[in-house]
Amino acid sequence: MTTEEFRDRLGKRAGQANAPVSETVLQALDAYFRLLARWNRTINLTALPLDPLTDDALDRLFIEPLAAAHYIKEALSGKPLPVWFDLGSGGGSPAIPLKIVAPQLQLTMVEARSRKAAFLSEAARALNLSNAAVINARFEDLRAAGKADLVTVRAVRGDATLDIAASDLLNETGVFAAFGPQPPRRDKWQVIRAVQLLPWAVESQLSLSRRVPRGTNRLTPI
C-alpha cells in the first residue's frame, strides 16, 4: 500500500467516524503504520492483518483511538498536562495514535515483553513523540501509586490484577479508559461514560470510569 493510498483511506474512514484528522496527523500515522508493518514481519506485534491492511485492522489500530480522543480529552478537561499510563501496550495501539492527536498527554507505555518494549521505544523515537516513555515490566509490578490522571487498556484480560494495578496508579480523580465490549467491574469502577466509537461496529466500545470510593460497596453518582 502506498503512502497516498493509506492516507486517503485513513482520512476517509476517520471522517466517517466523526474524527477528522489533519495532514500532519496523517503523516505521523502513516509513519507509525510503516514502522509497525516492518517490525511485525519478525515480531508478533499484532495479529491483525497489515499486508494487506484490512478494514478491521485499520479500524482497531487507528480509527478507534482517533474516535476515542475526543471523549478522553473531555473527561480530562481542566488538567493541563495529564499523566497517562497505557497498560500492556503491545504494538502501540491505542497509545501511539492517541498520543499523536493528544500530544499534551504525558504517556508511559507499559509492556512486559522485551521485544515489544523495544519496538515501542523505537516508535517513540522515530515519531518524535515528546513526553513518551516505555517501561519494560509487568503492570502488576509498577511503583507509581496515585500518579496517573489516565490509565488506558486494550486486549488485556480484565481481572482483579488489572483492577488493582489501574486503581493503584490513578489519583483520586483519575480516569480508567477501557477499549472493548467488556466494561470494567461495577463493584470497582463507576462508569462515567460508555460510547460506541464506530457506528458500523457494535463491539467498538470505550468505557470511561472512575474508582468506586474506598470504603463504599455501591455505586454513587459522580
Image (cartoon, helix red, strand yellow):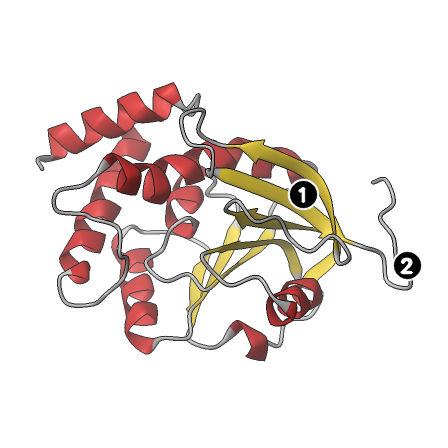
Residue under the image location 69 percent in, 47 percent down: 209
Residue under the image location 36 percent in, 62 percent down: 90
Secondary structure category for the residue under label 2? loop
User: Given the current orientation, which residue lies at the most extreme right position?
Assistant: 215
Q: Name the image quarter holding residue 72.
A: top right
User: Given the current orientation, which residue lies at the most extreme left position?
Assistant: 2
Provide residue 197's location: percent of width, then percent of height: 49, 32
Numbered label attached to residue 27: none
Q: Look at label 2 and name its amino acid.
A: Thr
Q: How many marks?
A: 2
Residue under the image location 86 percent in, 62 percent down: 214
Q: Is residue 201 left or right of residue 35?
A: right
Q: Name the image quarter holding residue 29.
A: top left
Q: In this view, does 27 lie to the left or right of 64?
A: left
The relative height of residue 28 versus residue 170 in the rendered view (above or below) is above
User: In what quadrant of the picture does the N terminus appear?
Assistant: top left
Q: How far apart are marks 2 and 1 (CA)?
A: 27 Å
Front residue of 133 and 142? 142
Provide residue 91's location: percent of width, then percent of height: 32, 58
Residue under the image location 18 percent in, 33 percent down: 6
Q: Look at label 1 and name its amino acid.
A: Lys
Tell me, yes or no, if residue 28 can be seen here: no
Secondary structure category for the residue under label 1? loop
Front residue of 214 and 21? 214
Provide residue 127's location: percent of width, then percent of height: 29, 50
Tell me, yes or no, if residue 5 can be seen here: yes
Provide residue 51's location: percent of width, then percent of height: 12, 47
**Mark 2 neighbour class, 10 Å CA radius: few under 14, some 14 to 19, many 20 or more:** few
**Residue under circle 1?**
79
The relative height of residue 167 versus residue 143 in the rendered view (above or below) is above
Q: Is residue 5 left or right of residue 131?
A: left
**Residue under circle 2?**
216
